[in-house]
Amino acid sequence: MDEVKGKNSQIFCLTWVKRGVAKLEPDQVILTPEELKLVMKNEKLQDIEEDADSEEDENDDRKIVIKVGPEKSHSDEEDLQEYGLENYDDEKGDFTTGISGLVMFADNDADPYITKKSKSDSNINSDSEDESAEKSAVQLKPDDNLLVCARCGQHSSVLEVYVYNHKSGDFYVHHDIPLLETPLCMQWVGFDPGAENMNSGNLLAVGNFNGTIDIWDLDVLNSLEPVASIGKGKVSKQRRKIDFRHADAILDIAWTDVVHDQLASASADTVIALWDLELGKATRVFRDHKNKVQTLAWMPKSDKHLLSGAFDGNIIMTDTLEIRTVAQWTIDGEVERITWNNENSKYFVASCDSGFAFYCDVRKPTEFIHKWKAHEGAIPGLFLNQSDSKNNSCLLQTASSDGLVKLWDLNFDKPKLVHEKDMKMGMVHCCEGNPDENSVVAFGGQKGQVRLWDLAKISETAKYFDLPEQVNNINSDVTLISPISGDGEEDDEVLKYIQGEDYIKPNKINKFSKQNGNHPNGSGDSKKKKRKRKKKTSANQSIQNKKSLI
């Protein structure tokens, strides 16, 4: 897999994991050589079966007569002889290629990279200092949050799992997961059909460019593949029926804790689908939109109302139980993002590619409470902070491709701009608030950077949060937190912008991250080249935007 570097990668989507959800001691995938051979064999057999199913499906409506020579009989074992698996343990060649480079060995004696054994030349005790250090490195604290982001490069993509601790200020990469598909959206899912308590899961649903949804277990390190992939649409041999699958890229997915086993997906094929996570199949399909559906969100505390927005400017609220359209709005431009007011589910905010934002009331279809020009570029990031119990104000954050993040108070005759900031990360693609710390928001952008912003440390916005002790001695220019690069340095321009007495520099990057030593946030450019870099994004850089993929 090609290395993913900051200058060639972008962050299109990210999501938080609540405190207390992740295992404090994550599980690890450890395969013996025998198990590794079995995995390779099963993968080959599965590929053969899928190819056969695909050929049968293509020939269903055609009668083809093919004359062949004498048929040779081969067993599965014979088919695998070309790989020489029976001599796998005896090989002394290059161990740096193949799937074996991605797994951990059951003991150090079996690891070809470990040449220095213990004094007795026996297995190293499991309680050795090295293993204790490894366990300590991956252990989580009860008050840790996880932040997962999808880093997309020109030739490869990876999921990065960060740890953030609000009390200590720690923010570092815990581990990462290499991806075979291009991720466009993600959603944390608190459901695990394989657990005793199915509502206690820590899964991540990732919507891909190829129209499938991969489910990853965030409590497992060194994962080789997702725990499940839905939407592949396999052919049922008994019924000769093809399960539903999206015909184009997955642009957004949404999950609600009201119905734990249900996931909604929006696709560039104009279709919205509801998936049963336990069965891995679509249960309902909605075709109300006539253009690509880019965003969707469940109404808070509702098990049936789903809001969606499309490229043609239509926003539709659907009753998923009665399968009907409840309300509809039309805006000028492509709908970029929608988000609900979690404290009052009668209201939601929508944004479009022309820089306009819309505040709407579900009781007044076709109408807008507010419509205003928020940015000069598209607004792919929206987040509404929960209001303080002592302050009924509603604080909206808009993140734009113009590089700016703006904060708006919606409790006026017209939206009031409270604060704005240039994030110094090119186009800002996404933002999401911490579910446990209301004032902390994460941002992902064009330059492959991930940043946190604590709004409680800004003098203009501190009043919106129940943290009066932080109002004094606040500097609004030093509120960004950013993970360090592999060499422990940030861009000079960025450091000048965010460094200060309130800036918390992360002090560790976990060695379980595959980018350790060359973290993808490090661009690798010389300082001289960075100073010459233009602020305005060139056309060649902009073509990597998510829309260019679809």
Image (cartoon, helix red, strand yellow):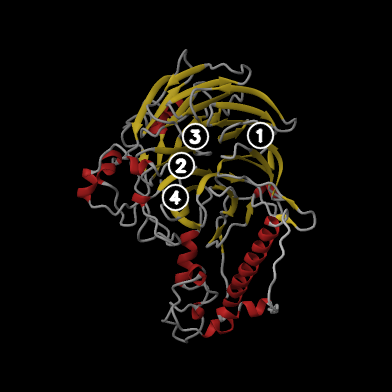
Mark 1: give few (<14), some (14-19) or many (20+) Cα within 10 Å. few
Q: 183 left or right of 69?
A: left
Question: Which of the marked residues, 2 or 1, is nearer the chain's N terminus?
Answer: 1
Question: Which of the marked residues, 1 or 4, is nearer the chain's N terminus?
Answer: 4
- Amino acid type shown at disc 2: Lys
Question: Which of the marked residues, 4 or 2, is nearer the chain's N terminus?
Answer: 4
Q: Secondary structure at mark 1?
A: loop
Question: Which of the marked residues, 3 or 4, is nearer the chain's N terminus?
Answer: 4
Q: CB atoms at circles 3 and 4 under 8 Å apart?
A: no
Give the vertical position of 375 relative to 145 (above or below). Answer: above
Using the numbered discs, state the Cα–Cα distance from disc 3 to disc 4 in whole angstroms.
25 Å
| Viewer-side residue, 276 vs 48 | 48
Indicate which label's residue lies in the foreground, 3 or 1: 1
For residue 287, which numbered disc appears in the image?
Answer: 1
**Extreme-left residue of the structure:** 528
- Amino acid type shown at disc 3: Asn
Question: Which of the marked residues, 3 or 1, is nearer the chain's N terminus?
Answer: 1
Q: CB atoms at circles 2 and 3 under 8 Å apart?
A: no
- Quarter of the image with the N terminus in it: bottom left
Residue 479 visible (yes or no)? yes
Using the numbered discs, state the Cα–Cα distance from disc 2 to disc 1 in whole angstroms.
23 Å
Pointer 2: what residue?
A: 546
Pointer 3: what residue?
A: 438
Indicate which label's residue lies in the foreground, 2 or 3: 2
Q: Secondary structure at mark 2?
A: helix
Q: 109 left or right of 462?
A: right
Using the numbered discs, state the Cα–Cα distance from disc 3 to disc 1 in whole angstroms.
36 Å
